[in-house]
Image (tube, grey):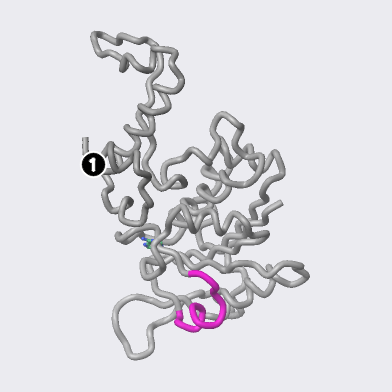
Amino acid sequence: MMKIDVLTLFPNMFSGVLNESILKKAQEKQAVTFNIVNFRQFADNKHQTVDDYPYGGGAGMVLKPQPIFDAVAHLTKECEHQPRIILLCPQGERYTQKKAEELAKENHLIFICGHYEGYDERIREHLVTDEISIGDYVLTGGELAAMVVIDSVVRLLPGVLGNEASPVLDSFSSGLLEHPHYTRPADFRGLKVPDVLLSGNHRLIEEWRQKESLRRTFLRRPDLLENYELTDQQKKWLEE
Ligand code: ADE
């Protein structure tokens, strides 16, 4: 079972997301346990402050090292496995499906979420094992980013998705975007489903899906094809 600890000043932000749908089922199936911790409780000063003014001056506050170091020490005492300690920040490595697959192999993840402010650099240098950004935009805090990473990792854990929704067929894990999907009716107000999908010819259907997947990737995300090894068949389709 994977253990996920989250250090945050806003634990309530997590309650809805972790307790619905697949993440809820994942806990019920004992694939994962979540422990959401307000790291203010580890502040060793009378007023429980977790941030302070930046040395050298300037705008904004900086998260102090002490509460976060002590919270992590508390979470890792008596742990058999070395955890990955993940800091969410716009300066981190850009998050991808490959990273999700890597993290899904771990036993213990600790996420550190800051809000509004920066982190004392010693947290980055001496505590954290991974810095992750979920994209080139700035959020008000790391909480939403942590939830994105948690969601994408937990759905990959064994037994979490049924066979119908196998993660093997996802966009990105194959290196290409998914082909289009249709369901009944075959004619919705004059809008028709492609004939081949109604043909019952499984070979032709599979070929259509592979072609559409490649076409979609070429049109929408040509950058994904730069690191993709095309088969001779796929090269032919692209020339068509
Ligand atoms: N915190 C603020 N913006 C972020 C981003 N884009 N990714 C991860 N953490 C963040």
Count of marks overlaid on the render: 1
Residue 129 magenta-highlighted? yes
Residue type (three-letter) at the residue carrying disc 1 = Leu
Magenta range is 120-130
> Mark 1 packing: few (<14 Cα in 10 Å), some, or many (20+)?
few
Image coords of residue 4 (percent x, y)? 63, 57
* Some atom of ligand 1 lies within 8 Å of the CB belonging to the residue at label 1: no
Image coords of residue 125 (percent x, y)? 50, 82
Q: Residue furthest bottom?
A: 56
Q: Which is nearer the eye, 161 or 225?
A: 225
Task: Label 1: state its secondary structure.
Answer: helix
| Image quadrant where one finds the C terminus | top left
Image coords of residue 50 (percent x, y)? 51, 74
Q: Quadrant of ligand 1?
A: bottom left
What residue sits 69% from the left and 39% below the top? Answer: 28
What residue sits 58% from the left and 42% below the top? Answer: 23
Residue 152 magenta-highlighted? no
Q: Which is nearer the eye, 234 or 214?
A: 234
What residue sits 49% from the left and 38% below the top? Answer: 169
Image coords of residue 161 (percent x, y)? 59, 36
Q: Which is nearer the eye, 20 or 237?
A: 237
What residue sits 31% from the left and 17% below the top? Answer: 194
Q: Quadrant of residue 71?
A: bottom right
Q: Residue tagged by mark 1?
A: 219
Q: Residue furthest front?
A: 232
| For residue 35, above or below residue 110 | above
Image side of residue 35 versus residue 196, left or right? right
Image side of residue 3 versus residue 112, left or right? right
| For residue 187, above or below residue 100 | above
